[in-house]
Amino acid sequence: MTYLILYIAGIASIWWIYRVGWIEALKTILSILIPSVLIILFNVKAGKLIFKSPIVGIISVLPTAFFIYRGSRPVVSGINNWIDKKRNEYVDSKDVVEAEVISEEKD
């Protein structure tokens, strides 16, 4: 089952990279992956409390996931800004030559 989920996620990632480009796909994947990993890590660490009382675990899953998601937004924004800054530094490089393409129309 895990392989099926990883296979679908891989195909979706390849399609997304094709659709929007490498940099935008990387930013989107990181904005999903970072909060997900933090939520999973929190639930693993808090598993002792969750497994002792399933009612507390069920009630606490959504609020903790929401707070972790909101708390990770500055980290995700910082990483996305860093990626944009690196991309802009490359575009503004002196080694890049701008060129115009003029098409010749044949009548």
Image: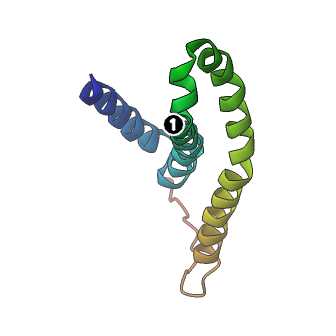
- Specify whether 3 is left or right of 59: left
Residue 40 image point, x, y percent: 51, 37
Residue 58 image point, x, y percent: 61, 15
Residue at the far front: name it.
52
- Is 60 drawn above or below residue 78 in the view shown? above
| Residue at x 58%, y 69% (from the top left corner) | 100
Count of labels in the image: 1
Residue at the far bottom: name it.
94
- Specify whether 42 is left or right of 2: right
Callout 1 amino acid: Ile
| Residue at x 52%, y 31% (from the top left corner) | 48
For disc 1, the marked residue is 40
Q: Secondary structure at mark 1?
A: helix
- Is 84 drawn above or below residue 16 in the view shown? below
Residue 93 image point, x, y percent: 60, 82
When asked about the image quadrant of residue 98, the answer is bottom right
Question: Is the N terminus in the top left, top right, bottom left or bottom right quadrant?
Answer: top left
**Residue nearest the viewer, comparing 104 with 97:** 97
When asked about the image quadrant of residue 59, the answer is top right
Residue 36 image point, x, y percent: 54, 38
| Residue at x 40%, y 32% (from the top left corner) | 12
Q: Residues within 10 Å of mark 1 (few under 14, many from 20)?
A: few
How does the figure colour the protein chain or chains? rainbow
| Residue at x 52%, y 59% (from the top left corner) | 103
**Residue nearest the viewer, comparing 34 with 11:** 34
